[in-house]
Amino acid sequence: MKITAIICEYNPLTNGHVKHINYAKKETNCDAIFCIMSGSFTQRGEAAILDKYIRAALAVLNGADIVVELPTIFAVSPADNFAMGAMRIISLIPDITHLSFGSECGDIDKLNEVAKIIFEEPEEYKNKLREKLNEGLSFPKARAEAFKFYVNGQNLNKELISIIDAPNNILAISYINAARKLNLDIKFHTITRTNNYASENIEEQLPSALAIRNALYNNKKHLIKQNVPTNVYNALLQYKPRLFALGDIILFKIKSLEGKDFANYYDVTGGIHNRIKIAAENSSSYEELLEKSKNKNITLSRLKRICIYALLDITKELYNEVLDAPSYIQILAINKDMKDDLLSCMSNYTSNILTRYSDINRVDKKLRSSIKLDFTAQGVLNIANKNNKLARSMIIVER
């Protein structure tokens, strides 16, 4: 079987995502599309707007053949670890021959060239990166400055500089380098993004998922109808914004933490927990906490992720435990017509496959902490959304 993977969030699934699925299937000539999707929280440290099983089923209804969950720890990680978590899943299945992704660049050769420099870390680049980090710049800014310095110093193609500044390019580079680290024999396929990933303009052709989420938050559902598949739109009609409830839970959790405990969470360095803790004590909302905590050297996404680590008790110890454990495949939804073939294919290579929560008892015991975290994250969102129905098993989708 020839399978093409897509790493995604589908928060929510848009017409642009469906276009990508169709292009990937056609241009890689694959038998199946294998989506690795963030579950309850996303890479920006935000809650997904629909339950992970619903989003997965909608993806299968609109062209994917199987959707598996990217473990929560990786889903709320910086780009390199986000990519590594997904590529570890891909590494389990040799039948995955291609990885397809969107990029602002749209040029695999240029993405490979940038990725190679970052992977090899030439001395000039590495020294400048260290210098910029010591100046207090955030890692993304320091990396961009170091890369620009290296390209100019080596008289390389100046077009490469702009590649490192675009979010989907950065993820693409992270995928390529994660494959290098894992010695994966996989081909890369990209589709050029025609819209701005961070644009909030709902009137653009194929608007971003961010623009669609903002329309939902502002109760302007009528603006999104033409930009998502009909079945996605119908699901979104049931959406009721309750982000303030989750924010209150996060704020309470951080206010209740002792400083020494907060310091043990993943990615908490340089006293950032003290800044967040002080902000929390003087804030009456999560939004106020974020506003008081941020500065020019701390990205908002990193700040939000740290708050999620506190909410879900993702300590440095737990993070390392998950990194040391084997990878697993937690299936959220699957195409009924492909079910037997896909399950047979995957079971040829690994026994760490879950189709329901109770499977936690038969997979490698080292996986339990990560799997429990996946369902804890889902449970927290259910509480915030006043939803008593906690889905715990794979959805078989008939198209």
Image (cartoon, grey):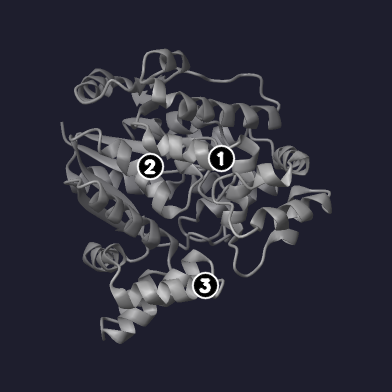
Q: Quadrant of residue 5?
A: top left
Q: Nearer the viewer, mark 2 or mark 3?
A: 3
Q: Amino acid at mark 1?
A: Thr
Which is nearer the N-term, disc 1 or disc 3?
A: 3
Question: Would you say 180 lies left or right of 173 here?
Answer: left
As measured in the structure, the alpha-carbon distance from the residue carrying label 2 to the one carrying label 3 is 28 Å
Compared with 189, 397 (above or below) is above
* Among the 4 quarters of the image, the one containing residue 37: top left
Q: Which residue is label 2 attached to? A: 85
Q: Earlier in the sequence, mark 1 or mark 2?
A: 2
- Name the mark on residue 349: none
**Residue 399 visible in the snapshot:** no
User: Which residue is found at the position 47% from the left and 53% from the top?
Assistant: 78
Left or right of 126 in this view: 238: right
Query: At x 19% / y 39%, what residue is drawn?
Result: 30
* Figure check: 12 above or below 138: above
Identify the residue at the far front of this view: 260
Which residue is the site of mark 1? 315
- Amino acid type indicated by mark 3: Asn
Up the image or down, 105 lies above or below 85; here it is below
Crowding at dot 3, Cα within 10 Å, few <14 / some 14-19 / many 20+, comes out as few
**Res. 134 mark:** 3
Tell me if label 1 and label 3 are in contact, CB under 8 Å: no
Identify which residue, 311 or 107, lies in the foreground.
311
> How many numbered marks are there?
3
Percent x, y of residue 51: 55, 31
Q: Secondary structure at mark 2?
A: helix
Residue 189: percent from the left, percent from the top?
A: 24, 53
